[in-house]
Image: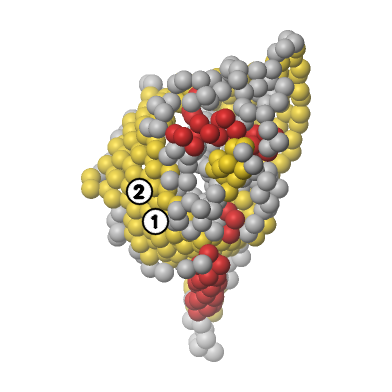
Amino acid sequence: MPHSRVISFWRKLFFSSLLIGGVLFLDQSWSQVTPGTTSNLKTKKPQRRIVRAVPVLRSYYELFFGLQASPFNIDGIDASNRLLELPKEKYFLELRPNWTYERNPREKFIVRARALVDSTRIQYKSPEDSRTKTQSKLDLSDAFYELLTTRSSKIVAGLHTYQWGQAELLNVSNPLFHFNTQQRTTFYKEKGLVLLRANVDWSETFNQVLIAEALSNNEASWVAEEDFRPQFLTKLELTSQDQLHSFGLVLGSEKRGKAFIGEYFSYSPWEGVSFYADARQTFGVTSYSPVVQDSFTVLAYDDTKKSPQTMALAGFRYENSWLDFRTEYFYNQPGWNKEQFKSAVQAIQTFSPYLAMNFNRFSHPGLELMGQQYLYNSMRFINLGHQGDMSAAARLLTSLQDSSKVLQTSFDTSLGDHLEVSLSATIGQGERLSELNFLGQSLYQAGFRLSF
């Protein structure tokens, strides 16, 4: 089936689902009145006591201060560091205000802002030199309106995040949000997308979510040289009565307007033990690959690739009162095999008319991870110490393609009710220019979070 027909089919399915959902929303009733009726002997008509909700504004603030050190080795790519300008050290101070305005039990407005000031030192070679760059930024990470349309449905509109499934490495069936190596650290904050979302519980065990991303959040595109394009999807989920098992199906469009199908499930045979999977098949190419053009290697869309392109994750989880352990396997068909990765590296090392373009596309190729097979292990120790106010974690991502690794460790402790101190290290391992140790780069962070 041609891609245009596939996309047209998914669009018709999505909007017909939205229409059906809207009709059923209107068919259900929402009572704004507390029944509290009393008898009136003269008129014999019941009287109702109207309960008027009082608007409530709640707020809290988080203040972060952190130091970062990031040694690296980029010989053979940009030895002087004048092109990449990788930071050697960084200091930052960030305030995150959080406001929730609850107009009534059905409506609320939520705003989360970020006010950031950072100072970065960049070290150059040939000749030896350095410069310090200071910048400030005021931004919104979330700003959305939530309305409970009925007892079993709601609508959310605005800047926010939304994910599902049990996987920790990556929510594969969700094409809206992407993998980041720092996503599990204390200081990381995902910026929301401008989404219109409708959640409907058709029954206690079956629900549906409709999502449309119609506007850009004004951030740089995840894929180099790609302009914003609207995305939409619908998600259907079936759960067991005890909510321990679930299966979901996701349909929609993603980057470059390509249609996709996603599936996920979770099965928990015993308390604290679960098996899960998350997958997606995309009908078309949405990422760059090395191809030969005018006798040069160029990173471009290779539409001759086999379709659909499949990504799949399978995992196991064990958790108790002090330990959360996971192991996950990730298969990434859109990624580059060993020879393709070698060709892509050569494309940014060899002088050609396409060198600048190749650098840009190599940095943002539209891939969650560049290779094709990975093993992820995670251990989190919680409720440590006499008062249970300490936690520690170790996470190891291994490329099964070239055996390179990235290890992330962290330690957090609370000092009282409002102050948390955090230490973390992210260290690449493997040969130089291998995938997960490409720049020989490590990242060490120390800081605190004050909430009030």
Query: Disc 2 marks which amino acid?
Result: Ala
Q: Secondary structure at mark 2?
A: strand
Furthest residue toward front: 295
Within 10 angstroms of label 1, few (less than 14), some, or many (20 or more) residues? many
In the image, 412 versus 299, the foreground residue is 299
In the image, 267 versus 62, the foreground residue is 267
Q: Secondary structure at mark 1?
A: strand
Q: Which residue is mark 1?
A: 263
Q: Residue at x 75, y 19 (%)?
A: 132
Query: Disc 1 marks which amino acid?
Result: Glu
Residue 301's x, y, as percent? Answer: 58, 48
Residue 48's x, y, as percent? Answer: 54, 76
Residue 354 in sight here: yes
Q: Residue at x 65, y 18 (%)?
A: 79
Q: Which residue is mark 2?
A: 277
Furthest residue toward top: 128
Residue 187's x, y, as percent? Answer: 58, 31
Give the position of the C terminus as an image quadrant: top right
Q: Is residue 49 left or right of residue 308?
A: right
As measured in the structure, the alpha-carbon distance from the residue carrying label 2 to the one carrying label 1 is 8 Å
- Image quarter of residue 404: top left
Residue 413 to residue 196: above or below: above
Circles 2 and 1: CB distance less than 8 Å?
Answer: yes
- Image quarter of residue 70: top right
In the image, 361 versus 146, the foreground residue is 361
